[in-house]
Image: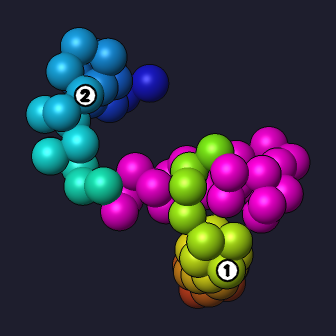
């Protein structure tokens, strides 16, 4: 892990409110949706864990997926 990421991890562990303020609640929810979905949870399970609409969880994940696929398809190998 890169040193700056360790600093963020340390901040998240020691002072969640500051971490959430720095990163933003939407970014944290997006990261959790992606993490939970990639670990095999259904949208219904994500809805229950995060207290968000099932359709919102689906939109967040699909948008992330589409952005990731688009980014990979535009990368050029040298």
Query: Residue 17's mark?
Result: none
Magenta stretch? Answer: 26-48
In this picture, residue 6 sits left or right of residue 74: left
Element at badge 1?
helix
The residue under the point 55% across, 55% down is: 51
The residue under the point 46% across, 55% down is: 29
Q: Main secondary structure of the magenta part?
A: helix
Task: Look at discs 1 and 2 and give the one toward the viewer.
Answer: 1
Residue hosting label 1: 55
Element at badge 2?
helix
- Whether residue 47 is visible: yes
- From what the image shows, is residue 37 above or below residue 65? above
The residue under the point 23% across, 42% down is: 20
- From what the image shows, is residue 39 above or below residue 57? above
Colouring rule applied to residues: rainbow
Which one is nearer the viewer's eye here, 4 or 57? 57
On the image, the x and y values in percent for residue 38 come to 77, 51
- Asked if residue 35 lies in the magenta stretch, the reply is yes
- Whether residue 3 is visible: no
- Asked if residue 69 lies in the magenta stretch, the reply is no
Q: Residue 53 appears in which quarter of the rendering?
A: bottom right
Q: Which quadrant is the N terminus positioned in?
A: top left
The residue under the point 64% across, 45% down is: 49
Q: Residues within 10 Å of mark 1 (few under 14, many from 20)?
A: few
On the image, the x and y values in percent for residue 50 come to 56, 50
Q: Residue 34 appears in which quarter of the rendering?
A: bottom right
Residue hosting label 2: 16
Q: Residue 3 appears in which quarter of the rendering?
A: top left
On the image, the x and y values in percent for residue 77 come to 63, 72
First-in-chain label (1 vs 2): 2
Q: CA distance from mark 1 to mark 2?
A: 27 Å
In this picture, residue 27 sits left or right of residue 66: left
């Amino acid at each position: 892990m890169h040193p700056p990421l360790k600093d963020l991890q340390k901040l998240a562990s020691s002072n969640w409110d500051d971490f959430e303020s720095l990163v933003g609640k939407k970014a944290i929810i997006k990261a959790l949706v992606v993490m939970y979905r990639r670990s095999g949870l259904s949208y219904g399970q994500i809805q229950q864990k995060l207290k968000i609409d099932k359709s919102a969880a689906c939109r967040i994940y699909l948008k992330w997926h589409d952005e990731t696929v688009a980014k990979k398809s535009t990368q050029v190998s040298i």
